[in-house]
Amino acid sequence: MKYTNPIIPGFHPDPSVCRVGEDYYLVNSSFEYFPGVPIYHSQDLMNWRQIGHCLTRESQLPLRGVKPSDGIYAPTIRHHDGRFYIVTTNMTGGGNFYVWTDDPAGEWSEPIWVAQKGIDPSLLFDNGKVYFTSNGTGWAPVRGAYQCEIDITTGKQLTESKFLWPGTGGSYPEAPHLYRIGDWYYLTLAEGGTAECHMVTIARSRDPYGPFEPCPHNPILTHRSLMNDIQSTGHGDLFEDHHGNWWIVFLGYRYGEYSWHHLGRETYLAPVEWIDGWPVVNRGERVLCTMEVDRPMTPHPWPATHERDDFDSVTLAPCWNYLRNPDPALYSLTECPGSLRLSCGNPTLDDLDSPAFVGRRQEHLECEVSTLIDFTPASENEEAGLTVLADSRHHCELAVTLIGGKRCVIVRRRIGSLSAEVACTEIPQDEGPVELAIHADKTTYRFLAGTPGSLKELATAETRYVSTQVAGGYTGVYFGLYGTASGQKSNAKAFIDWFEYRSAG
């Protein structure tokens, strides 16, 4: 079996997986983006396709005014008695909750809240009981894993929260998962913080409440102090495939250039073997981007996705997200069939609001995006185009606007409190479509614009300035389509004929 890591590239952190027969379902954190918690499906662990989101309604996911990297943290997916459960934390909207469904590609329930605090919650269904596990950061006297039993129908806490295990001494013990494997209960933690010291540790007990005996070769997964293409490996979830082999999914990231990464934390996969009652990840060796393992798994590729989105459906494809809870009046896929209409609303990309923005993750270090936009601004506060967005204080725009009565394309860069237009070129025609493009490699974004089929490079920007090391936070870069009137009223509309994303590497 050969496969390529990351199995789900780009901003897809905190993976959790469950198996139902020969089908596998995986979820990730989504933070301030809406809809929340993307869900993926695979039948071979190598090929994954997004089938939707778990949180698609504002009643499930209130995000108004949330700061970057707040919102939804670390979901866990589990399946029990024909029903799927996703348990997670809304950091700014009520704490821990879960939703359920009988169809993972369909609608999920309204939130059912759980009293136990902490983040990174997980569920274990065992012997008629439901164990709810979360970490103790910020609310408990000792950091580590805590657990109670809940009523899965109501979310009511049935027992007091009990401390389980502090980990091995690494900072920020979090992401607890409790598993029943044979006669043992195994408890995993993520330790070391979600950067270069990240790791996965494990302990076991005969009782779900301990005491827990740590693994003698902890951590079972880490790339700390290693020169490797994959860094900061941690936050793992163990599972068994339909052939009886064990695996772990976990997060990590790839540097754009040395010590800088901007794609966000991605989802990786590694084989697990059980030796003397303990899991050994990838034979104790480093996990690589190109993996070959001696395990039976028939490839099941999904139909190829189209590079170009022609916006010929009445709904957006699952890869698209909004910032926070969107204003439906700012968007239409039916006003001009075959195009996406964006209205230039008051919020801007700098605001903790929901501007007219639809974005998709940058998934490859080397890629190209382009779009055909028909936009005729009536005043100099109106603009629409493409953005490279890390958060509200770190982004770059390639936009059509009006300057001195002339329709122009500008390039703007914002880095923290510094914002500057670094290029401007006049569009020869007063109206008509303009093609915009961004070409990316590991270190540089190149911004191009012109009449369709005739593009000229206007400016460049370094990828490091939208990296996690500069912007902070837990997300990765999005390529977005946006429109704004810079805080003023406007009737301007931008019509997006198509958007194309191509991997170049």
Image (cartoon, rainbow, N blue to C red):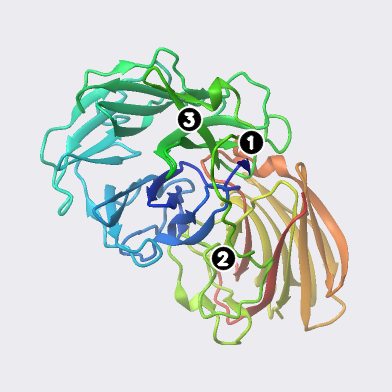
Q: Is residue 304 left or right of residue 275?
A: right
> How many dots with numbers?
3
Quadrant of residue 59 within the rendered picture:
bottom left
Q: Position of residue 151 (x, y in %)?
A: 14, 47
Disc 1 to disc 2, C-alpha distance = 37 Å
Q: Amino acid at mark 3?
A: Val
Question: In what element is the residue under mark 1?
Answer: strand
**What residue would you read off at disc 3?**
272
**What residue would you read off at disc 2?**
358
Disc 1 to disc 3, C-alpha distance = 13 Å
Which label's residue is closer to the chain start, 2 or 3?
3
Q: Amino acid at mark 1?
A: Glu
Q: Is residue 443 above or below residue 300?
A: above
The answer to whether residue 194 of the structure is visible from this angle is no
Depth check: give the residue in front, 473 or 118.
118
Q: Is residue 22 left or right of residue 295?
A: left
How crowded is the residue under tag 3: few (<14 C-alpha within 10 Å), some, or many (20+)? many
Q: Is residue 478 left or right of residue 368?
A: left
Q: Which mark is residue 292?
A: 1
Q: Amino acid at mark 2?
A: Val
Which label's residue is closer to the chain start, 1 or 2?
1
Question: In what element is the residue under mark 2?
Answer: strand
Residue at 78% over, 71% down: 435
Question: In what element is the residue under mark 3?
Answer: strand
